[in-house]
Image (cartoon, grey):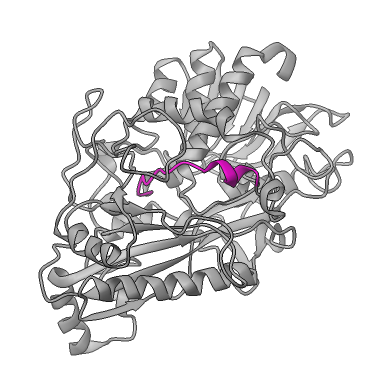
Amino acid sequence: MKRPEKVDVVIVGSGAAGSVYAAIFAEAGKSVLVLEKGTDRKLTDLYSSQIWARRLKGGAPHVVEEGKDSIWYNFNAGHGYGGAAMHHYAVWPRYHVDDMQEHTLYGKGLDWPLEYEQLRPWYDQVQEDVGMSGDAEKEIWRPPGAPYPLPPLPVFEHGEILARGFTELDLRTSPIPVAILSREYKGRPACIYDSWCDAGCPTGALANPLVEYLPRAVKAGAVMQADSYVTRVLTDRKGMKATGVEYYDKAGERHEQAADAVVLAAFTVENSRILLNSATDSHAGGLGNSSGTLGRYLMSHPAVNVFGMFREETRCYYGVTGGQLFSQDGFEKEKSGDIYGSRQWEIGLGTKPNDLLGIAMSRADLFGDDLHDFVRRGSRHLGAMVGVCECLPHEANRIELADSRDRFGMRLARVNFNLDDYARNLWRQTADLGVEIFKAAGAAEAWHSPPGGQHIMGGTIMGNDRKSSVTNEYAQLHDVPNVIIGGPSVFPTSSSVNSTFTAHAVSLRSARHIAEHWGGLIN
């Protein structure tokens, strides 16, 4: 075993949240070490291919999935510098005001320990840091905030054609809010609209950790270390304070990295797994689990992909993967019958011939000549959009430890996830409406996918009451305050919006607060 030199902060994970903490703490003068279980990576290592796109996702360790519904772990997770934010589509809507007070307003779900107005300035700062494109006035559903620093991305034939269906049904659309550059920004080039977001963005037009926060962290003195597989958070004898982390290097050698503070930003499922594996006599149920809620309230957005074949050419290969237009008509929580939850549409997705969101996979029932013919037609005439639905937090949806173990003897994560009737009914309504929109747009054929899991949240939720939550409003463990949790695992509700923007804002708020009050919060 080796004991490297002690640092002020050790950060586990280099993705959306970890990169923000690294930049802010390093710029505050703290010695920072970022441990990434995956590989070293630069923008020049990214390649526009579907095979490469798969290399950015999933990765060890395996997650055992149980329950009726999948969280699509391997689709959502990431591996290597930048984490899952290397293959995300950079669709960045904000949480709404009522997303953060659902229990108070509707008697369902949970309340956040902070309100939208407390998060608003951090959304504004993040969009200024990374560069966002959109139209705040046309995005009529958007809660208050600063205008986007860049104009919206252009809308091509694909978006224009699908917009007809929304107009026919009296539904409104706006330019999509994305962390993709419509113009040069801070020395980074504008998007070239080749729809390879899923494979990473080697030009730097799309905001990922390698273009803003990680470079800032390194410039301020942070050290990046790849191939460092963290297994446990270490604590002192009394269990009152974290002393660092245990990790294994590429050769399988064990290390104990000492630190005054630990930021656990290892992705949603891994955060709970590491804390559960960090159990001691003082924390028998896992580190930070005095409430019994560690690993609980797991959430994933039930999403539906809607497709249609048009007689006119859509040029569906042009644009960005996340879409050209956006709609949150139908976002209101309370709907008729046994349906509850918000919904949004991302319209005009850039498509490729194959892989999960590709042309061929939109008709997985076709084979041989029928599939060849379909792909030939689809490459010019297909339309695609996605409807993203809300999932309520339930204590029974959880992350636990499996009986099986990784190569270092640590127990793997087991997830048990089941959508409730509210979410299932909302998904069915959304799927039917999506097909109706496509037919109204003039599609000769229209169909939808089975349910898919987009974004993974919960497991280490924040709250004011330490008896019913794992972290406080600044994402510190109630039980061990010098352990800070990064990412959507701290979200008490899911809304229906993509989680990465909010993960940045929550992390930036937390990092700034802790850096400014270091002595009182960490020591």
The answer to whether 384 is drawn above or below residue 106 in the figure is below
- Residue 23 appears at what percent x and percent y? 47, 22
Q: Is residue 181 visible?
A: yes
Left or right of 465 on screen, residue 274: left
Left or right of 500 on screen, residue 164: left
- Residue 229 appears at what percent x and percent y? 57, 43
Left or right of 153 on screen, residue 22: right
The residue shown at (57%, 57%) is 333
Quadrant (top left/top right/bottom left/bottom right) for the N terminus: top right
Q: Nearer the viewer, residue 152 or 206?
A: 152
Residue 206 is drawn in which quadrant? top left
- Residue 140 appears at what percent x and percent y? 38, 44
Residue farthest to the front? 170
The residue shown at (50%, 39%) is 502
Q: Nearer the viewer, residue 515 or 275?
A: 515
Which stretch is magenta?
88-101
Q: Nearer the viewer, residue 227 or 370?
A: 370
Residue 407 is drawn in which quadrant? bottom right
The residue shown at (26%, 73%) is 440
Quadrant (top left/top right/bottom left/bottom right) for the C terminus: top right
Left or right of 172 on screen, residue 191: left
- Residue 80 appears at what percent x and percent y? 43, 43
Q: Which SS does the magenta portion mostly show?
A: loop
The answer to whether 306 is drawn above or below residue 373 in the figure is above
In the rendered picture of this protein, how many numbered marks are placed on residues?
0
Q: Is residue 351 visible?
A: no
